[in-house]
Image: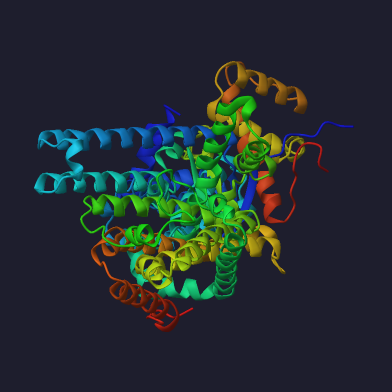
Amino acid sequence: MARREPRSRNRMVITPEGVALPLVLATRGARAAALLIDLALIGAAMIATTFTLIWIAGGIGLKLQEIEANGPKARALQALVIVWIIAMFLFRNAWFLFFELGPRGATPGKRVTGIRIAARGTERLTTEAVIARNIIRDIELFMPIVFIGGAVAAGSDTDFAGWAGAVWCAIFMLFPFFNRDALRCGDVIAGTWVVEAQRRKLGQALSVSAPVAASDQAFTFAPQELAVYGEYELQTLERVLRDGRGTALDDVADAISRKIGRPYPTGAERVFLESYYLQLRAQLEQGLRLGKRKADKYAA
Amino acid sequence: MSEAAPSLLGRLGGWFSPAASAEIAAAEDAALRSDRFRLEREGEWKRLEAIVTRIEKGRLRGISDEDLLALPALYRTAVSSLAVARETSLDAETLEWLEGLTRRAWFIVYGPRAGLGDWLMRFFGGGWGESVRALKQDILIAFALMVAGTIAGWLLVASDPDWYYALMPGGMGDARVPGASRAVLMGTLFGQQDQHGLAVFAAYLFSNNAQVSILAFALGFAFGLPSAMLLIQNTAILGALLWLYHGQGLTLELVGWLSIHGTTELFAIMLAGAAGLHIGRAMAFPGDAAVLDAAAAAGRRSAQVMVGVVLMLIVAGLLEGFGRQLVDNTAGRLIVGGFMLVFWTGYFFVWRGRGQSS
């Protein structure tokens, strides 16, 4: 049996305007890294808040034993404890919510790893979806840690129920590994997925940047010389021209020159390739407008 | 790239200044048709990119009204450019960049429409009640389960008092055990108004209860069964308590003690369980939709309810922490509890709010 290829991470969504947009699913590794970064940040924020509150309490001369007493000092201390409890609750539950509702759709950890959340299908990402996907985090993360940690700590003493609980929780935790889109339970409930958020710069248009296009020393190729290649080769050539320097240019120019049986003067590889690229693209694009596509050199 | 950058800048600059337009025209003559298509629209694409980048960086204030108004139109231009370019251009670089730009703009144009503030306004102004009403069937199921749990708890303990210890999450020094005298039980219900640190107690209760209800909801993911079990188990404790106090003729006092915060808290737990059941039901019986779509739709509907549940538990925590200790008589407790019950029922099922558009 042939080996199965690793499944592609490319997905398509259709915008409401009816145009297909390609998306690349984030790798599970990137998501795990993002989560660890977020947890570290949340932990740091919790510790910082705790110490700040302790410092404030110390600053106004409060001691923890006085909390049961009556009087202004006890009240101040109680207020601080309430602030602490609420802050801990918010850090645990609202951190992801707050950041994922922003225009970036990503927590700090996700930003660092270059990923973001998006709605599956054609629907827009809604506030409810973001809430739903983050409310589920409790059974996926915190509960398994408690259960599995408990089972491991108890070692051989763990009874059947303990192990059953641990396995049960592991199913939730490992959920992203059991489906093609790497959805975690929260993603399933909310109708979201996590995709890569690439940003890139636009390169110069080649027919403008190529100074030789209209100059005298440009080569002119006959239609049969251009008919050798298709779109795939054209785009490979584009890549070479955009970032290739030195030997890559030489090799490609040699290959083309041999294939079409046309020599070029030494030192003129770039001119040769740019001329060939522009004329090949002009020919292929003309075919495109007439509804004829030539995918690669093997196509008829 | 490095040698191309200045010429690109020069060209773009020239693009906008009429003086250099002759030069551009010459370049355009030389350019491919698809590159001319690109050059003609590049200005708008770049403007869109600038706006999108600013929004992504969170600097919404730095964007002029003009730009914000233009955003949807610019986005549509980019989308249609992409559609045309795919059919006419073989410039992989432009296509990929345009895809990336359209994607980023799509995320923003079709992103979460309301910020947290706006969303909360809509939420209190009727959205909450609407989402609760959408779960009517599940609420009925959850209510039935809770009643069944209470009765089961009572019957179990009545048949064999040992069940009491199995049901109660036993605290060591808890006085509430079978065989306790009337006076002891009475003492657990009244006379705690001298306690201090009530506020801390309330905040703790809220945090704890909210985490439990979030759990009840999240467990709905496993086809709702754990949610149902959680509901039954928790109300079985209630049934056992009722039996215990009933034995000493303190039923009404216990109901008062529970109801002051319990009407709110049990209501919230019922809603959380219903939300969990709703998701479980949608996944087990998705109907015509695909399982994933059904789960997603149910999840979004019930997420709103869950936000409401957390808010209700804040109220319940306050009532439990302050109200119960400060109102030390059964009649007062019953009045407060009854009022809360009427309030929630009216707010969810009677008051329709504004914004009933959809």
In front here: A32 or A25?
A32
Q: Is residue B275 visible?
A: yes
Q: Nearer the viewer, residue A14 or B195?
A: B195
* Quarter that holds the N terminus of chain B: top left
Please determine whether, in this image, residue B221 is positioned above or below residue B346: above
Vertical order, B140 against B320 (above or below):
below
In this picture, residue A130 sits left or right of residue A165: left
Pick the residue in front: A288 or B243: B243
Q: Quadrant of the rendered structure where residue A300 is?
A: top right
Residue A268 picture quarter: top right
Residue at image location 40% in from the left, 51% down from the top: B175
Position above or below: A11 against A17: above
**Picture coordinates of residue A29 (x, y %)?**
57, 32
Residue occupying image coordinates x 65% and y 21%: A264
Q: What residue lies at 73% left-to-right and 34% top-to-bottom?
A: A6
Residue appearing at x 58%, y 34% in the figure:
A148
Residue B58 point in image, percent of width and height: 32, 48
- In this view, the residue in front, A8 or B150, is B150
Left of A177 or right of it: where is A59? left
> Can residue A20 be seen from the camera position used here?
no
